[in-house]
Image (cartoon, grey):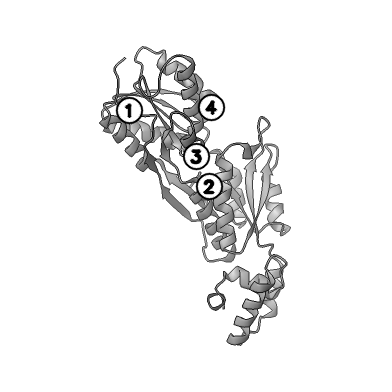
Amino acid sequence: MARKAGVAESTVSRALTDSPLITEAIKAKVREAARELGYIPSRQAALFARNRSFSIGFVVPAYESFPPFSRPYFPALLDGAVAGAEERGYSVTIVLDKVSRPMSEHFALVESKAVDGLLFSVTPTDYAPFLALGESGLPFVLIDNYREGLSSVDSLPLPGMRKAFSHACNLGHRRIGFITGDMRYRNAVDRLEAFELLAAEFDAEPTVVEGDFSRSSGYRGAGRLMEGPRRPTVIMTCSDRAALGVLTWCSEHAFAVPRDVSVIGYDNLYPAQDVVPALSTVDHPISKSGLVGARLLADLIEGRERGPAQRWLETDFVVRESTATAREP
């Protein structure tokens, strides 16, 4: 019936149960398709539909220092999640995840039918609560994180970072600095591992300093790298925000980018193309991660996917104005 009406199966269920979330035009289209097919909805199916909210919870960390949606990562991820949810007939409910909130409260959201499943947007590598949540049978998906036994969507850093290394080395760069992300997160660990592998592969001279994805850590890291004994000719970072911190440090200390040092970010969020110079960066498909995550969650909710299931996306690389031919210090 869904195919005949040209809508998602979840939309059929909503339309036949007179959900206020479905327009009258769509309801009429579904009812006409049902009439033509001679469809008589079963009482059990109708009761099942009424026991679902057709909403998914988008879990976002609640930071004390700044509102979560003031940073471009979360809006980009939410854009994809909303598109994927809408495609399957679901709405999205924002769930602020306070540090003190126990996982049992997330379970209660689904048990109470407030939402049918959860998308977790930023999570550290403390997997014990999620393993317990998975054992309960509650549908959820981790985005930009992964572990065996849990459903997730993540992007492989190696393809995009290999292109970044190739670009830098073709420009004559051999001394390459790297500012890490927060090592409590899987993405930071994976990006550092990719950097170390590629430095060996391209026979580069790497220097690594610790960061935490933030702009301030990029600023501090740039100082440590540029004032060190073997100043790099290109600095790579674990996030675009950190790269912006590098650009600020260079500007304040009379280093011209890219004349004196090239800079490569990671994420390709909207500030990357607007700063001066525009940032060369690894293209991390954040919105697509949200889209694929919402689709996977809908599959888990509807029983199309038994789980746990993992979806892997690939990164790419975008060349802009912050990289140029290496200049020896």
Q: Quadrant of the C terminus?
A: top left
In this rendering, position of residue 5 left or right of residue 28: left
The quarter holding residue 228 reads: top left
Mark 3 and mark 1: Cα distance apart in space: 21 Å
Rendered image: mark on residue 143: 2
Q: Residue at x 34, y 21 (%)?
A: 233
Kind of residue indicated by mark 4: Arg
Kind of residue indicated by mark 3: Leu
Q: Is residue 140 visible?
A: no
Comparing marks 2 and 1, which lies closer to the viewer?
1
Mark 2 and mark 4: Cα distance apart in space: 22 Å
Question: Mark 3 and 2 residues: CB-CB less than 8 Å, in contact?
Answer: no
Rendered image: mark on residue 215: 4
Kind of residue indicated by mark 2: Ile
- Residue 118 in percent (x, y) is at 62, 52
Could you say whether the residue bearing mark 3 is in a helix, strand or loop?
A: loop
- Residue 9 in percent (x, y) is at 58, 71
Question: Mark 4 and 3 residues: CB-CB less than 8 Å, in contact?
Answer: no
Could you say whether the residue bearing mark 4 is in a helix, strand or loop?
A: helix
Q: Closest to the observer: 64 or 250?
A: 250
Mark 4 and mark 3: Cα distance apart in space: 14 Å
